[in-house]
Image: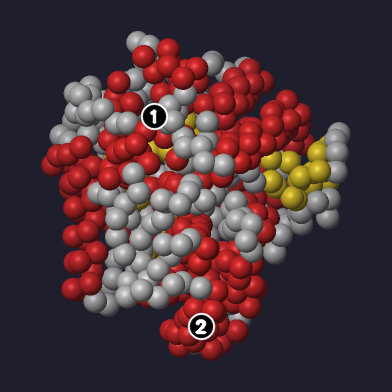
Amino acid sequence: MSTQTTGIEVVGVLKAGYNEVLATEALRFIEELEQNFGTRRIQLLQYRQKRQEELNNGYLPDFLPETKHIRNGDWTIAPLPKDLQDRRVEITGPTDRKMVINALNSGAKVFMADFEDATSPTWENIVEGQINLRDAVNRTISYENQNGKRYVLKEETAVLFVRPRGLHLEEKHVLLNGKPISASFFDFGMYFFHNVKNLLAKRTGPYFYLPKLESHLEARLWNDVFIFAQEKLALAQGTIKATVLIETIMAAFEMNEILFELRDHSAGLNCGRWDYIFSYLKKLRNHENVILPDRSQVTMTVPFMRSYSLLTIQTCHRRKAPAIGGMAAQIPVRDNPEANEKAFAKVRADKEREAYDGHDGTWVAHPGLVPVALDVFDREMPVANQIHTNKQQKINITASDLLETPTGEITEEGVRVNINVGIQYIASWLSGRGAAPIHNLMEDAATAEISRAQVWQWIRHPKGVLKGGRKITVEMYEQFKVEELEKIKCEIGAHAYENGRFTEAVELFDSLILNDEFVEFLTLPGYKLL
């Protein structure tokens, strides 16, 4: 089915209830966003490619000389609204109905509903996610499982943030003049248009997380989108608040500038650790000295990750902005108390480091981890936040600190885990599930990106050598892949394997690994298969 309003056309299937979200007025709003900002988005993506070519030719990222006055300037972001003062624990997850209810009820201060890395962008997931969020804002949301258990919202719920898809992604089910529109503008525009007035009536607001920004110019684009959106709906400027995920190595050198561009709409920065590792590897993949050990060894305590975390805190607090820590991907291990306690101990240690360093909050991926993180932050941070403390203000993080390659080993187990997790995640994603519990971790697109990027680089890099001396090769990859697929089939069962889109997942994973041209995001070719 299709529905058309002026130049915009919906070509996705229109199921019952979809027309309420895809209303004429909402589509016109989306059309205006695309008309006013679509060309700039494409230009900024081209600028990303230009910078990547420079990196491929030996250039290393550095702080921008032309914006030194912003870094040295004495300015702060606009004051935060009351319900964003205390964000000590935030839970993230996809926008399916049960998850939305459980996350809002989890006891976390914030729930970030994620249309990006935790959601497979099927048309149904995207539109029904908007319906679920609308119902959550209206407090009419409920869900009943197959056993008759009913889920409804508690009286007190988390503050809702929404993460639209990244600027690099398109929504192929909505066309403007025959071409797909920006997925970012669709996700942002639909949520904002349908919910802003009800949010304000409930004394909260339209709050967003902005993913995968690579420069302050992209932050400027978003700021202009916010100004336009507020003007169109006759709202006060500064109504929208957005936290930017610092999850690219390029953005790490422009934190001050990103906050400055969004200063009237800023709700701080977040350490998107998994995408950051992927970005570090992706952007610097052709540098002979840049190679990462097993993913499990690249923790927040290795030098380049620790420098990034500390610089985020320093930058945010200087600008009176919150600095939110990274994701704990562990999930409860219900059938193994010993393994469960080990997982929880890792989470506690990670959150203690964040709270002690000065972060104002942190992320978890599962409701069962909320009490663990809350306990740490309640103990280490008895007030709403640490914005006004002097922690980290005397440190001096240099460009070399942000780029320092960690030491460590590449092991056979590390290669196998990357192949195993990468293929399992892609199969889940192609089946419509963007958050996948694999080996007691909640995997999303970011961790799958690390998995395939490491294997791709290890095969091609002179230092891509296993502990013990064997060079990682295509032949080794093919052997390990066959063996890991047999393990997966045994673990999940032959029926689940045959019905799990694994054939397509293997084909996509192969194309990502075997193609000498590095694919920027696995979700780009993956989206064609949805």
Residue at 60% x, 51% y: name it: 520
In the displayed structure image, the side of residue 339 where residue 217 appears, left or right: right
Q: Can you give x and y, in whole percent of width and height, for residue 457 in the image?
A: 50, 60
Q: Mark 2 is on which residue type?
A: Gln
Does residue 187 appear in the picture of this structure? no
Mark 2 vs 1, N-terminal side: 1
In the displayed structure image, the side of residue 238 where residue 38 appears, left or right: right
Around disc 2, counting alpha carbons within 10 Å, would you say few (fewer than 14), some (14 to 19), or many (20 or more)? few
**Dot 1 corresponds to which residue?**
268
Looking at the image, is 42 positioned above or below residue 372? above
Label number found at residue 479: 2
Q: Secondary structure at mark 1?
A: strand
Residue at 46% x, 58% y: name it: 450
Of residue 419 and residue 26, the one placed in the foreground of this image is 419
Q: Quadrant of residue 271?
A: top left
Quarter holding the N terminus? bottom right
Furthest toward the left, the residue is 379
Q: Can you give x and y, in whole percent of width and height, for residue 388 in the image?
A: 23, 22
Q: Secondary structure at mark 2?
A: helix
In the displayed structure image, the side of residue 456 where residue 28 appears, left or right: right
Q: Mark 1 is on which residue type?
A: Gly
Looking at the image, is 457 positioned above or below residue 174? below
